[in-house]
């Protein structure tokens, strides 16, 4: 059965995380794929005896492989990681939309009531910004159909940085940067939550360092 494609633009158009060997590929924006495949009943197989030791080793191997595929983090050992995301550049032209992977990583880390934004290659942070109760980040939630958009953003001088978590039927992390002239950067993690990005299911960003606010840029509202 054909896949049903749920297409949504986050800020601009978003994109399908489909990069091959570091070369840009043409893609469609922010596509979440859902499949409903008919299953044919199969005859019941005879029960098999499973070695408990071997089963445990296989389970441990799968956990190790999963952890190794997750994005690395800028968060320090004394901090709690909330979000880690790989970063791909979005390129737009008359021929369509393509993406190119980079070595940059975005992390949102928690230290008490503080939220730390770090961006850059592992070991080399290009941008770091900390939100405190006295100088909070901003947050805004928007919805379009069955897709939710949780935006955390801040400004550094005339520059605004948006981190958007795509929720519901959406998937992925978007990073959008604006200056006084308009949008100057459009980045995306990819769609795979076990390879392209990771968001903690155990912690939330501390509300003490977040202030609800409507984004000043129209396409982020």
Image (tube, rainbow, N blue to C red):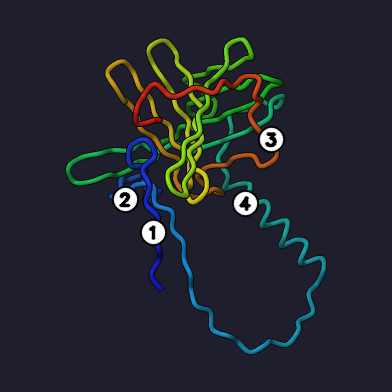
Helix, strand or loop at mark 2: loop
Nearest to N terminus: mark 4 or mark 2: 2
Helix, strand or loop at mark 1: strand
Residue 165 location in percent, x, y?
50, 38
Helix, strand or loop at mark 3: loop
Q: Residues within 10 Å of mark 1 (few under 14, many from 20)?
A: few
Q: Residue at x 69, y 57 (%)?
A: 61
Instruction: In the rendered view, tell whether residue 45 sits above or below residue 51.
Output: below
Residue 171 location in percent, x, y?
48, 47
Labels 2 & 1 near each other (Cβ < 8 A)? yes
Q: Residue at x 64, y 24 (%)?
A: 207
Residue 105 location in percent, x, y?
50, 32
Q: Residues within 10 Å of mark 3 (few under 14, many from 20)?
A: few
Q: Nearer the viewer, mark 2 or mark 1?
A: 1
Q: Residue at x 61, y 22 (%)?
A: 115
Mark-to-mark CA distance, 2 and 1: 10 Å
Quadrant of residue 82 within the rendered picture: top right
The residue beneath circle 3 is 203
Kindly give the residue lying farthest to the bottom in the view shown: 43
Labels 1 & 3 near each other (Cβ < 8 A)? no
The residue beneath circle 2 is 28
Nearest to N terminus: mark 2 or mark 3: 2
Mark-to-mark CA distance, 2 and 3: 32 Å
Q: Nearer the viewer, mark 3 or mark 4?
A: 3
The residue beneath circle 1 is 5
Nearest to N terminus: mark 1 or mark 4: 1
Instruction: In the rendered view, tell whether residue 104 sits above or below residue 2.
Output: above
Mark-to-mark CA distance, 3 and 4: 20 Å
**52 to the left or right of 23:** right
């Amino acid at each position: 059965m054909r896949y049903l494609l749920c297409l949504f633009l986050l800020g601009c158009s978003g994109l399908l995380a489909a990069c091959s060997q570091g070369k840009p590929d043409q893609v469609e924006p922010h596509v979440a794929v859902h499949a409903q495949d008919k299953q044919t009943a199969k005859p019941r197989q005879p029960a098999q005896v499973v070695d408990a030791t071997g089963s445990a080793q296989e389970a441990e191997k799968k956990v190790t492989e999963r952890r190794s595929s997750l994005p690395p983090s800028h968060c320090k050992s004394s901090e709690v990681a909330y979000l880690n995301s790989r970063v791909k550049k979005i390129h737009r032209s008359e021929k369509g939309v393509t993406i190119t992977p980079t070595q940059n990583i975005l992390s949102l880390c928690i230290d008490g009531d503080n939220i730390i934004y770090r961006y850059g290659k592992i070991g080399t942070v290009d941008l770091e910004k900390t939100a405190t109760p006295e100088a909070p980040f901003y947050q805004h939630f928007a919805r379009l159909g069955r897709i939710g958009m949780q935006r955390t953003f801040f400004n550094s001088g005339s520059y605004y940085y948006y981190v958007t978590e795509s929720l519901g039927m959406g998937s992925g992390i978007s990073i959008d940067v604006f200056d006084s002239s308009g949008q100057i950067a459009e980045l995306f993690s990819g769609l795979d939550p076990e390879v392209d990005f990771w968001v903690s299911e155990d912690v939330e960003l501390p509300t003490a360092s977040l202030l609800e606010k409507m984004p000043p840029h129209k396409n982020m509202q």
